[in-house]
Amino acid sequence: MMPRKKSKKSNRYYFTKEHEDAIIKYVLTNNIEERTKLYVEWIQPAFSEMVDKIVYTYKFSNLPNIDVLRDDCKIWLTTILEKYDAEKGSKAFSYFSVITKNWFIHKVKKTTQQQRREIDYDNLSKNLEQSHLSTENGYDSNREDKEFWKFLWEEIDTWDTGKLKENEKKVLEAVKILLKSSDEIEIFNKKAVYLYLRELTGLNTKQVVNCLNKMRTNYRRFKKDWNEGKY
């Protein structure tokens, strides 16, 4: 008896370029029939598996009534399909996975509040963070990490406007060196970062801090846009 061949589909990622293209076509057309076909054949299956994987990977399965929440999230994704804009440079996978995680994080907050626990959304306790936001080294998290760093480097390149002061240029270049060498150097705390930056730039701590303040503002804006799925 001949052994059964494995389906080619089983070796493919669930969110492929075909799914990305289907979402782009969906957004660009107003034809109901075409949209329905794209959604049923391509988008809905990808969304369904993406939500299921995020729930499992980030341990949102610990939430009460998770099955209902999971279905609600899948329905909600269909209502924001038109908000995706490929021209902003973000891949559909990255865009929808980020806002899906944020949707469930909001549910964590809401559930916690209902249980009368005073926890701020931006300062979740370590236990809650580890319980709901810990990741596994799977395809999804690796892919998202790569996309995050890709867009972060593109963002950092825009910080050199050609009008930077000499000290600002030195600190920016030093920051780039630290980021590129992050796997090779040991940084235990904030003081160590300043020490490295002082060594690389020849500036004192106050000069380094003044230059970093502008970069912090740019990074916070980038991170906010990333969390909102704008990349």
Image (spheres, rainbow, N blue to C red):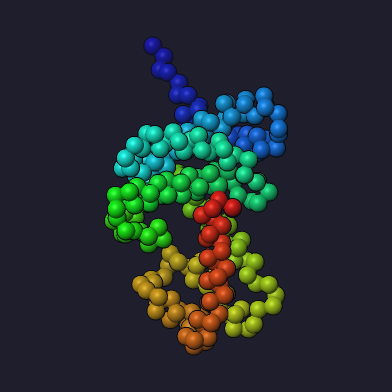
| Residue 48 located left or right of residue 27 | left
Q: Is residue 48 above or below residue 195?
A: above
Which residue corresponds to the image point at 67% horizontal and 35% vertical from the top-left?
25
Which residue corresponds to the image point at 32% horizontal and 58% vertical from the top-left?
118
Q: Is residue 75 above or below residue 208?
A: above
Q: Is residue 169 above or below residue 37?
A: below
Residue 135: in sight, yes or no? no
| Residue 123 located left or right of residue 27 | left
Image location of residue 209, percent across then percent down: 50, 81
Count the marks: 0
Q: Quadrant of the N terminus?
A: top left
Which residue corresponds to the image point at 48% horizontal and 83% vertical from the top-left?
198
Image location of residue 146, percent across then percent down: 51, 53
Which residue corresponds to the image point at 49% horizontal and 86% vertical from the top-left?
206
Residue 64: in sight, yes or no? yes
Q: Looking at the rendering, which quadrant does residue 169 occupy?
A: bottom right
Outermost top residue: 1
Image location of residue 114, percent across then percent down: 33, 48
Image location of residue 13, percent across then percent down: 50, 36
Q: Nearer the viewer, residue 189 or 12?
A: 189
| Residue 128 located left or right of residue 197 | left
